[in-house]
Image (spheres, grey):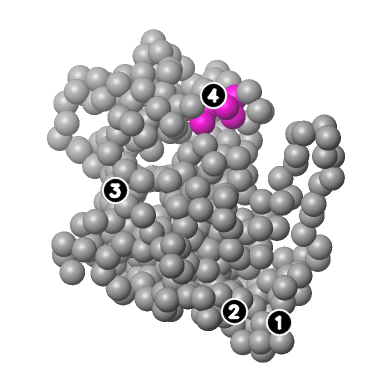
Amino acid sequence: MKNDANRYAVNIKRLRIHYQTRNGPVKAGEDISFKVRPREVFGLVGESGCGKSTIGQAILRILPDSTRVEGQILLDDEDILKYKREEMRKIRGEKVSMIFQDPMTSLNPIMKVKDHFMETINTHKPKIKKEKAIDMIKKALDAVGIESDRLNEYPFQFSGGMRQRTMIALALIMDPTIIVADEPTTSLDVIVQAQILEVLENLKQSFNSSMLLITHDMGVVADMADRIGVMYGGQLVEENIKDKIYKEPKHPYTKALLGSIPNTDIKDMHLSFIPGAPPDLLNHPERCRFAPRCPKAMEKCWEETPHDFVMQDGGRVRCWLFEKESEKKYDPDEVGELVG
């Protein structure tokens, strides 16, 4: 078991996440399992409200205390869902870190940029000398294209792109096992977004960290991800290597999602869309959650929740259409690789 665990930066098994509300539990995550390998970028995509960010927050254990979380999140062969608050605080920032959507809400406007880094370093390496810490900060900022002479400035003196670069450097400063990047380019304009993606792409080659890239933008994962998991209604409905997802999508939702990407070819200005609305995660029956919007829905889709089927190409898909074609049901406890 130990040898298998070392093959993954993080291994998520049968994760269930329910937000407790006065109207009942909001089932934001149901039976979610996937693995992120060392130095891999795993893209998690889907519509807003499908549970992507909730998974990222569950990995860092920053969900509201009232949230019910079940399953396993294995980091270094240990289930961090069993960690106490202080144990989690020790690994947050060192083994697992996060790049948030809006850096201005994550950076303290009255703290110098340098002090944000010093706080993280001193938390995990309290005996480190100041000179050594400053050298670590300068190298981290240099890696994301920020000059070291701006260490003593404040976040409000930085542009939006520079603040996000700072957040990336802050996430990397301790060289964590896994970085959760939650919509890292959403709050930026198109030009700055391209610059940030270029920074992230360059960092893939020089750091040992793996990345869980959470986004609704299929173009972003096309540039960055090695493998892709497609989320819908709190469930992972398809997983495969990037090329297979884009060239040979299987789940009807994945096909519809790819079909709704604007086409820049002026000869074909038709824009597809997905009819209907995402499922109500507060009240949904036990059936396929995409059935009301699916053009290929069968009678069985309205009666039973589909299994997670492993396909011959090594990917997996949660859809009754592939029951006969699949080799077996997906088992998150199975040792070995799923896709190449």
**Quick check: 289 left or right of 77?**
right
* Residue 46 x, y percent position in the rendering: 61, 56
Marks 4 and 2, Cα distance to the nearest angstrom? 41 Å
**Quick check: 28 left or right of 133?**
right
Q: Look at the numbered discs 1 and 4 and tell me whether their residues touch, using CB distance below 8 Å.
A: no
Disc 1 target residue: 298
Q: Amino acid at mark 4?
A: Gln
Disc 3 target residue: 38
Q: Look at the numbered discs 1 and 3 and tell me whether their residues touch, using CB distance below 8 Å.
A: no
Disc 2 target residue: 320
**Quick check: 212 left or right of 196?**
left
Q: Amino acid at mark 2?
A: Trp
Question: Mark 3 or mark 2: which is in front?
Answer: 2
Q: Amino acid at mark 1?
A: Met
- Badge 3 density bin: few <14, some 14–19, many ≥20, Cα 10 Å: some
Sequence order check, earlier mark of 3 and 2: 3
